[in-house]
Image (tube, rainbow, N blue to C red):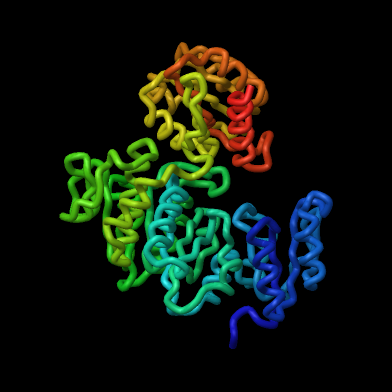
Amino acid sequence: MELFRNKKVLILGLARSGYQAAKLLIKRGNTVYLNDYKEEEKQDKNQVEELRNLGVNLVFGGHPDELLDNTFDYLIKNPGVPIDHKYVLKAKELGIEVINEVEMAYRLLPSDVSIIGITGTNGKTTTTTLIYEIMKEAFKERVHLAGNIGYPLSSILDRVKKDDIIVIECSCQQGENFKDFHPHVGVCTNFSEAHIDFMKTYEHYKETKSRMFYSQDSSDIAIMNYSNSDVMEELKNIKSEKKYFSSNENINGCHIKDNKIYYYDDCVMDINDIKIKGMHNVENCMAAIMAVKEYGVSNEIIRKVISNFKGVEHRLEYVDTINGVEYYNDTEATNIKCCQIALSSFNKPTILFLGGLERGQDFNELTNYMANVKAIIAIGSCRDRVALYAKSINKEVYVYEHLTDGFDKAVSIAKPGDVVLLSPASASWDQYKECEVRGAEFKGKVSDLKHE
């Protein structure tokens, strides 16, 4: 029986993945219901109109108890929906399979397509983008980008042909509902505590991150960060062939020697040719090198792409230098670990924007990274707690509810040679729809400053 035809499906959550899943399923002759908690007037009008015209049954403004019953064949959960949502729990009671858009699209892919899957706590978007850019340079239109990076897998199904290669970023929220999905080449950048409010425990978080590796077989490849003990422990029993990279150990794999990156015994490139800052980005480059080498990509192409790569927007992104002050947008630093990485990347006096959504994050974990921080701009709903922390470590602190107000203070105290860094160690949902909006606001203020 052909998959996902003439079935009854409930999609929980609109967003990009729900929208694309609904379009794909309705075209395959399924009866599709899409439910989202937000009222219709808060949804994208064009998306709503298109889906309604296609025949999708839309239910907005809540989650009616009677909507989900045993007549449904599948529940497709948006990654952002809580794992203990009442529909998810009810579906499991009723024996309805709960999957996500990636798992659905994966089951519809041609069997002769190759997948490179990237996961991890930090660095996965940079690593995914690097792999995609290198593979695109090497294999042109055969390469497609998908997943958590913003392109639902179902949106590219019509374009994927025999022997094509898909580069896909996978989040823990997506991993929660993986069943069959697994990459031919899997990359794990690192593990550290994150999304515990969503995943409930660190153990569950690591397990969901690792599900794509659990489904691999002996013909698949797993590329792992040798220096991250949690990765090594969590993936020790997988069936795939393990290969490693490390920035601080001379291993049989991708390693550093004499300030150069080696792929086994082959010198690939000089670290000084990498434009993106920080040893974490060197590790991202090493992970990317390991992945593309599985497809025989030359050192020449690797060097060309990496040496011209200036980073992913919103991830330790260099914005501009104005009056001798460098401005960096790291709004994607929504957890403590990301902020630690950002602070480790600079050895200049730094003015740090810190704070956002109150999630009980422990700012004391930043203390060992604060040596170069000359002042803290405390922002967001947890700003008062940030201020108390700053005072406890004797750092100058200025408290503002909004980033835009604090920006003017940062400019007034910055001196030539300083860095102004937005790396808030906090989610943005207290004030913004998504953290990219916060980053765009910061970049807009820098742009305004340049044109004053």
Residue drawn at (65%, 38%) of the image: 429
Q: Quadrant of residue 276?
A: top left
Q: Position of residue 235 (x, y in %)?
A: 34, 57
Q: Position of residue 445 (x, y in %)?
A: 62, 28
Q: Position of residue 322 (x, y in %)?
A: 51, 23
Looking at this view, name the residue that lies furthest to the bottom. Answer: 1
| Quadrant placement of the C terminus | top right
Residue drawn at (35%, 54%) of the image: 288
Looking at this view, name the residue that lies furthest to the front. Answer: 451
Q: Nearer the viewer, residue 239 or 439?
A: 439
Location of residue 70 with respect to 296 vertically, above or below: below
Residue drawn at (45%, 19%) of the image: 418
| Residue 438 visible in the current orientation | yes
Q: Position of residue 250 (x, y in %)?
A: 18, 46
Q: Nearer the viewer, residue 345 or 76?
A: 345
| Residue 356 visible in the current orientation | no
Location of residue 301 with respect to 318 vertically, above or below: below
